[in-house]
Amino acid sequence: MNAFLVRKEAVSAWIRRLAQKNTVYFPQRAGHSALRFKPVQEGSEVQFERYHPTLVPPGKKLAPANEVLFHYRQERPDDPEMEPAMDESPRILAGVRPCDLKGIHLMDRANHEGHGDPHYLLRRAHTTLIAHDCLQPCDDACFCDAAGSLHWRQNADVFLTPVADDLLLEIQSDRGKALVQGENFPVCPDVAAYKARAEKMRTKPFGRQFVTALTNLPGIIAKQWQSPVWEQHVERCFSCGTCNLVCPTCYCFDVHDDFEITNVHAGQRTRTWDGCMLPGFAEVAGGHNFRPQPAARQRHRVKRKFEYLTRHFAETSFCTGCGRCGRQCTANIDIFNIVNDLAKNAEVRP
Amino acid sequence: MITPGIDTNATFDKKLYLPRMARILEIKTMTAREKYFKVELPQPLGHRPGQFVMLSQLGIGEAPISISCGPRTDTILEMVIRNVGTLTQVLHGLQPGRKVGVRGPFGSGFNLADFRGRDVLFVAGGLGLAPLRSLIQPILAQPELYGSITLISGCRTPADELYREEVQTWSRLDNGQGKIRIIRLVDDTAHLTWDGEVGLVTEPLADLKMQPDNTVVALCGPPVMYKFVIMELNARGVPHNQIFVDLERRMKCGVGKCGHCQINHVTCCQEGPVFRFDLIENLPEAFR
Ligand SMILES: Cc1cc2nc3c(=O)[nH]c(=O)nc-3n(C[C@H](O)[C@H](O)[C@H](O)COP(=O)(O)OP(=O)(O)OC[C@H]3O[C@@H](n4cnc5c(N)ncnc54)[C@H](O)[C@@H]3O)c2cc1C
Ligand code: SF4
Ligand code: SF4
Ligand code: FES
């Protein structure tokens, strides 16, 4: 009894019910058109359709901007009390799309590796994911299928697939099971058949496609250190770092200290999102910069997504194809086009 | 209320980013820009030569600083700090008795076994002598375990020389056997008295008496130095797997998370900052 067939409105009502006892984040309209993952409250819209990628990916709820690492208090000089700021508050992220589900999976990998990041891992351990499939691409910027994200199911506690007026609700973990405890959802009689039905509804081809298979890209990109493509695509770049900020798999940070305005003996060490596109990112004392040109920084960003981290974790690409960076870039610089041009340059044809 | 169980198989240290407080025992002015710091840690650090710590002052900030003393079993840590910015300026203003935050030790470091039984050549540029001292000390403490031991140490002017007295005691260790050679250079005497040589660290390399096949080199200095020293070592025929380099990158976490120290796909704070040259010579970002 791991899959149910539930009317769409009933699923929305269930999410609202969950939100009465839990913090549930769901994509909601902020301003005119943009969606943001915001806590579901009394009267919040819980609407699975008309989805458009949120400005900031849901995974950033696990590594928030301006995150306090620890507080300190130093009443007696040099005898500080320090307390790590650990966030163990349980939360549910609902309405997470496959690309962002994969994004969270990749962040799990990066944060587990070596010295595990305690702040991320603790939040993650208290986070439940309710994901929702996509049957048509969000817009022209999307290339999740090409980036290997469209069929991502791993890590979701509950996975929802639209089938006509219903949602196929699949339980994928014990946590997911706990969420439907006591709900008398109708059991799905034939999961495979309903999945096949949904699959038939899916737009094909789904969004933009690279000229070559995803698995060829690390090799192709590795060989193009000096490609003219790096310069071509960066001509208009302002080095603003927006592409880093909105990316579900950018996790670099800067660290700084503040003391409280009212008490110089107390304060906190905080980390803030940082981005490799920003000019000072690789600068060391004395002013030497290891990536002074925008093209060198862009190359690093692209290689991280499609070559370095992909190979390091022996996995699919670290770009999820969500399209956020291209959508948000004022200069219309799109990582899809950069990568596709690199592939074309390598004279790889479909 | 749903409280999901932890199913991420994660073991993690909640205090990963929390410094331990160390008391400053001694501060000595070395040059106009550099001060020597000796601090006492709450527990022994148990470091390897070439490792670094993240040093901090609460309310000001944190920065990577090399460990400048050889491995030791007590709780003492020695460092040399150049005054270049926010944190280092505050550290320069401190008095003994005050405390600083320490995290670490981090990084790969040097392995003494790589040097044992071989001729050893150290090449230090400026502040590069501070981290190399953590390797020089244990090697000079047991010179019988090594072949010839040579240090080429260069700085801008005589006023910039680090560890002057100590380096002079190192040259006296030799007793005329020719086993330990210390070559001190300045770019420019700047009209000061100087008892060493004048020139760049690459110059003595050209006619240094050495058996390249049996020589292991440890190299640390400013970014521009590496390329030229390695060109010279190439000319002398030193195999690349016998050269170790200590590289500097911007670092914010020290534990492979913040992304700042990345050299192509390599994380300098974890896999470095000491690298065997042949393993990174093909990384385009390593020596630019
Ligand atoms: C492994 C390792 C070992 C080191 N060992 C030593 C050592 O033994 N002794 C030592 O003195 N130093 C050492 N350093 C260098 C030291 O970490 C830096 O000098 C340190 O960051 C100085 O900190 P600060 O807060 O005083 O300087 P900051 O205030 O951070 O400024 C220092 C310099 O960093 C650059 N900078 C700072 N902020 C920015 C920004 N936002 N954008 C662009 N550039 C910026 C500037 O060039 C500036 O001159 C080491 C570095 C590494 C990576
Ligand atoms: S968002 Fe666009 S302009 Fe800004 S750094 Fe990224 S590529 Fe450059
Ligand atoms: S690089 Fe761009 S398209 Fe790829 S995951 Fe990041 S924001 Fe999305
Ligand atoms: S210093 Fe943060 S990743 Fe190396």
Image (spheres, coloured by chain):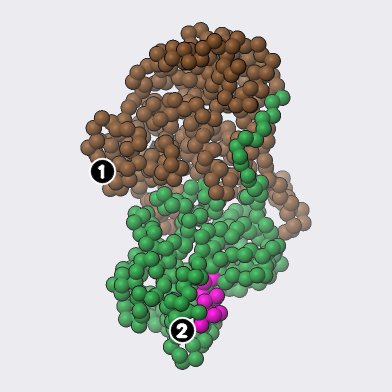
Chain colours: A brown, B green
Q: Residue at x 44, y 74 (%)?
A: B122
For mark 1, does the 10 Å Cα neighbourhood hold few (<14), some (14 to 19), or many (20 or more) residues? few
Can the viewer see residue A44?
no
Q: Quadrant of the N terminus of chain B?
A: top right
**Residue A181 horizontal side relative to residue A104, left or right:** right
Residue A264 coordinates in the image, percent (x, y): 70, 50
Q: Which residue is mark 1?
A: A228
Residue A243 coordinates in the image, percent (x, y): 43, 36
Residue B69 is one of the magenta-drawn residues: no
Q: Secondary structure at mark 1?
A: helix
- Find the magenta span and give its range: B134-144
Tell us which disc is closer to us: 1 or 2. 2
Q: Are marks 1 and 2 in contact (CB under 8 Å)?
A: no
Q: Residue at x 42, y 16 (%)?
A: A199
Residue B46 coordinates in the image, percent (x, y): 62, 65
Q: Residue at x 61, y 41 (%)?
A: B10
Q: Which residue is mark 2?
A: B180
Nearest the viewer among A241 and B102 is B102
